[in-house]
Amino acid sequence: MTAQSSATVARPIPVRGGTLLACAGVAAFSLTFPSTVWGLESFGPWALVALRTVIAALIAGAFLLARRVPVPARAHWGPLAAVAGGTVVGFPILTTLALGTSSTSHAAVVVGLLPLSTAVYGAARGHRAPSRTFWCGALAGAAVVVAFAVQQGGGTLSAGDLCLFGALLVCAAGYAEGGRLAREMPGWQVVGWALVACLPLAVAGGAVALAYEPVRLGVHGVAGLLWVAAGSTFSGLYAWYRGMGAIGVARASQLQLGQPLLTLVWSVLLLGERLSAVAVAAAVAVLVCITVTQRARV
């Protein structure tokens, strides 16, 4: 591969195609938490994150080599670092650690604030001033999630909740920066280079984790690992970033409103979890609050 002397211009795709891609990304992401819980049946949290990154990076690297994609321009590596740190490393580590103690349905409600976090970050990054209605909806949604987490934690926030809130922050930055970059280079290349950049760290981390964490291979564990690697981390991010590049961060985040509810469905069908009325009510309330922010003029 040779150094890229100018920005790679992504081939424009129709709005309808971008919407379908973003929806495919949301569908893939909705399975991430249940698949992570399955993966934890066979691997420790650090090994699971490292292995999912290694597998996804190898897939991405193969695509980049096969297509002879040039190395991104120097100006692109800053946003790529945000994508790598937020969506490839930070979000998987924090949510995997949280799912060691939190239920999938609980995590789905808390992470339901991700579209809101992404919109806030995108507005700040774009130097735009959101309207008063936007902030009212944002604060209401945050209040609902905090109240839900405190109620579920018996009056306090658990360590898992703190991990989930941290995951919201880093993933929002990765989504917003990746969406902006996907307007200048193909979305799959944004994901691909972010994954490849993390490969050395993932290989080293995986070697250490596998030496200290027990491995109990099983059908669920292997299936969960393969999905979070090939389905969520590579295919899901590819579809999501390309969709965001076509229809914009704000519109794409609207489509993500259904992700928590989809995850709740998967938690029942795949994990056999029993949903509490509080969890469903909180998820719906968050959806309403985020809908208000998305419809507010910026």
Image (cartoon, rainbow, N blue to C red):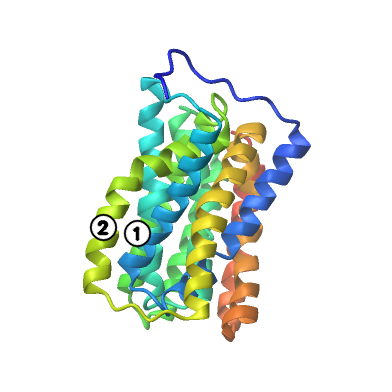
Front residue of this view, candidates 243 and 230: 230
Q: Which mark is residue 19?
A: none
Quarter where residue 101 is shown: bottom left
Q: Residues within 10 Å of mark 2 (few under 14, many from 20)?
A: some
Q: Name the residue type under label 1.
A: Ala
Give x and y (percent) for residue 109.
Answer: 53, 68
Q: Residues within 10 Å of mark 1 (few under 14, many from 20)?
A: many
Instruction: Tell me which residue sits at (57%, 40%) in the image.
Output: 241
137 relative position to 18: left or right = left
Instruction: Tell me which residue sits at (22%, 63%) in the image.
Output: 208
268 relative position to 216: left or right = right
272 relative position to 19: left or right = left
Image quadrant where one finds the C terminus: top right
Give x and y (percent) for residue 243.
Answer: 64, 39
Q: Which residue is mark 1?
A: 50
Q: Are marks 2 and 1 in contact (CB under 8 Å)?
A: yes
Work out whether mark 2 precedes mark 1 in sequence or the reverse, and give the earlier one: 1
Q: Is residue 290 above or below residue 98?
A: above
Give x and y (percent) for residue 63.
Answer: 53, 39
Q: Is residue 6 above or below residue 186?
A: above
What separation in Å lies between label 2 and label 1 (alpha carbons)?
A: 6 Å
Q: Secondary structure at mark 1?
A: helix
